[in-house]
Every structure is written in structure tokens, then in C-alpha cells.
Amino acid sequence: MQRIAVIDYGMGNLRSVSKAVEFVAPGDEVLVTSDATLINEADRVICPGQGAASDCMQALYEHGLIEVTKAVANTRPFFGICMGLQVLLTRSDENGGVDCLGVFSGSVQRFATPLLEKSQARLKVPHMGWSEVTRYEAAQSAHPMWDGIDDGERFYFAHSYYCVPTDPMHVAATTQYGQSIAVALAKDSVFACQFHPEKSANAGLQLLTNFVRWNGTA
Amino acid sequence: MGLAKRIIPCLDVDGGRVVKGVNFIDIRDAGDPVSVARRYNEEGADEITFLDITASSDNRDTIFPVVEQVASEVFIPLTVGGGVREVADVRRLLNAGADKVSINTAAVSNPDVVREASDKVGSQCIVVAIDAKTVSAGGDPLRWEIFTHGGRKSTGLDAVEWAKRMAEYGAGEILLTSMDRDGTKIGFNLPLTRAISDAVDIPVIASGGVGNLQHLADGVIEGGADAVLAASIFHFGEYSIGEAKQHMASQGIEVRLNRP
């Protein structure tokens, strides 16, 4: 039995994430916790979260979780989801700008409004619903996190800000929303996505299954 | 290809039980919200909406265990509305496992609750439900106003202006119900849907009046809706979610189809 820690820094509903992980890993221990020691002792770590980036960084700071989050991201399988992806970038433009954890070099920006397709049709913001997720960087296309998931499978999104990583080698997948945007990043033992696997029906459960089996190498 | 248009079945829940008769022959307990939600997930619903219509304040808390159970077993987005008055109600529903909370009457009596809630939990969790009714006379330019209390009580608020204001206050989505059409099965109020969808940058869910699959497609193509919500056509087994998606796809609408 392995121990999977879900980092609880007080931002948003973690029940969906923890229940989905329990569903795919019934034999494992799933721990929703803000205790740095327990997080550091876990075999693998999930960082979910929603809300504004500045609030999330502030909450991580107040819970004394900045250092442990960076440390576990480097040392064991680590899965960032939604805001748990965005805080991994260098900085976010949200709420006038905030420095983030810098696990991936790059920034988080807001969708333009009005947001237009190439056809000039207007797109709504937030980007809300099921979009096709397409493998991007060849080096990432055989990533073990994609096992059993079709290229182009749809996942559920709900966000107004998106990641702009500086190194294209880190981009594991993109989607089209006004332009091509990075929606999954991967590097060493870290995999992170903008969409919500815990809300993406079978495809999402497969991604979570892959995470609880992943040895942390691409 | 990009974002799919969503199909959302809506369930009325009273005292923790599904009401208005869901009728699936293969569901043992059609009053059990978890069974019904599971079934809709299997059919490929993109999201599920629960409307808590529990009238008695003694039973108000019955919705929470329902949300907890559904969120533990059905892994698609879940919106919960009905009786949401303050930010504490929003938080409780989110903590129970709802992904989005729909605010209706409270937004009219106290619009700041929308601003406060979206500040606290993020716009993507806040749906503002708008019940609109046609108020213009025949021949005049179309006008719609917001009604509360199941369409009985006029507020005098212009529906298009109200939708814009709710978007400014931080709503992440509008659930737009035509009170003229609700229950009629003659189709969405398409001019109303188009007017609201064009007026705001946030997604609009069309609701009220669906009687057949072409009505769903019309809501997207003519109404400009980002998602379509229906209850009875799905509950009584007239059409499955899968049939609805196939029909929409045949009209050139991008939908999420279940892969074999």
C-alpha cells in the first residue's frame, strides 16, 4: 500500500480529487493534508486547487508549504491540477501579478476579451467545458501518464487564465481555444494539467490511474 | 476542433429524492439521485445539474449527503442550485462536492452575494440562474424581464441588462430559463437566448421548453447557447443523451461523443 498525499492549502474543493483518487486506487491510502511532514513522507503527491493565483500562493505560504511543495515535486511523482499547475510557473498575471513556485519557467496570463477564433467567432471566458487535448512535444507523447488515453481525447476545463511556458520541451499537450494553448506540462517527476481529470469521466480516471502507477520518470 | 457544446440533464431534488418522475426501466430506484446521476454519466452527459426544491426549512440539509454521494461516484461536473442565499451556502455545497453553485433569487435581492462569492471561490464556480419572461407587447421590440418565485413575481429588471451586470459581478456562467417556455415542450425562447448570449462574454446555458432533439440543436445554432439543459425529454426515456449528441453532431455542432 502506498500513501498518496493531496495537498490541502485551503483553496477549493478537494473532495472531488480525493474521491476520484480513492476510486482508482482503492488499496492505497489517500491523505488530504496540510501537514508538511506528512506530505514529505508520502510516496506521491497531488496538488489541486482553484481560485486566484495570489490567494493560492498566499495560502501555501501561510500553511508553510512553499518549500515542501517544491521539494516533493523534485523527488517523487507529483501531479498538479488546475491551479496546482498554474502555481508551478514562474509567475502569474492574476490579481496584478504574483511570483509563483518556478518549477516550470514561464507565466500565467488571462484570456483576452473578447477572445476570437481564427474565424472571428467569439469565444466565451471562462473556457468552460470539454475540449480536445492533443499531444504536443514528441518527447512527451509516449509519457506513461498518457497510457490508455487517445490523442485528442476530451477533458473538462474551467479556467480564465492559461499557462505560457518558455520551454516548449515541457509542453505535454495543447488545446485550441482562440489559439493553441499549453494544457499539460511535464518535466522529470512532475506532470501537471489545466483540465480537471477528477471531472473528466473515464478519460480523467484513466489519467489518475496512470498517476498512481507512474514511477516518476518519462 | 475545440470546445464541445454541452448537454446537461437537470434533476429536481426534494428532501434528498429525485422528483418529477424519472422513468428509466433499468434503474431500480429512480428516486435515488446517485443512481440517476450514474446513469446519465454512462449515457455521456457532460455535466449534471441538481435543483434542490425542498420547501421545508427542516429538510434543507438533505441536499448535502446527496451531493457528497454523487461526487464520490460520478466523475463529471456537478452544479447544484436552489435555496442558495449567502456565501456560506455556496461554500457548504462546494465542500460537499459540488463543482458549481447556481444562485437565483438571492442574486436579485442581494446582487453583492454574486460578487462576494466569486471573489471567494472563483468565477468558475458561480452560475447565476436567470428566469426571464417576455414583457413586450406583440409588434413591439422584444423585451424580457427577470421574474422570481417560479415566474410569479416580477422584478422589473431587464433581462439583458441584468445578465451583463451579473457577468460584471463575477458570474462564471448564466443559466437562462425562459419562463414563457418552461414546461411547454415547444422549444427554447431563441431570441431571448441569442440576446443574452450576445450580450455577455461568459458562457450561457439555455433552459426551458425542450420537447425534441432539434430544439437542443436550435438552442446552439440559433440561440448561440454554449450548453443546453433539459429535464423531461431525458427523464422519461424519450431520448437518451447519446441520441441527443448524435443529432447535434449531425447538425454540425461539436459535441463530446463517447468513444467505443
Image (cartoon, helix red, strand yellow):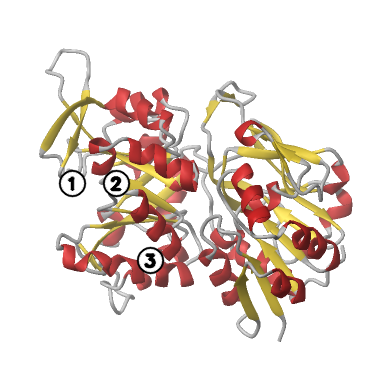
Picture disc at residue B63 = none
Which of the two residues, A122 or B202, is positioned nearer the viewer here?
A: B202
Report whether residue B238 is seen.
no
N-terminal label among 1 and 3: 3
Q: Secondary structure at mark 3?
A: helix
Quarter of the C terminus of chain A within the rendering: bottom right
Coordinates of residue A76 in the picture (x, y in percent) = 82, 69
Which residue is disc 1 drawn over? B183
Which residue is disc 2 drawn over? B212
Which residue is disc 3 drawn over? B67
N-terminal label among 2 and 3: 3
Mark 1 → mark 3, Cα distance in angstroms = 26 Å
Closest to the camera, between mark 2 and mark 3, is 3
Residue at 25% x, 36% y is B108
Q: Is residue A178 left or right of residue A199?
A: right
Coordinates of residue A71 in the picture (x, y in percent) = 82, 62
Q: Residues within 10 Å of mark 1 (few under 14, many from 20)?
A: some
Q: Secondary structure at mark 1?
A: loop
Amino acid type at image mark 3 = Val
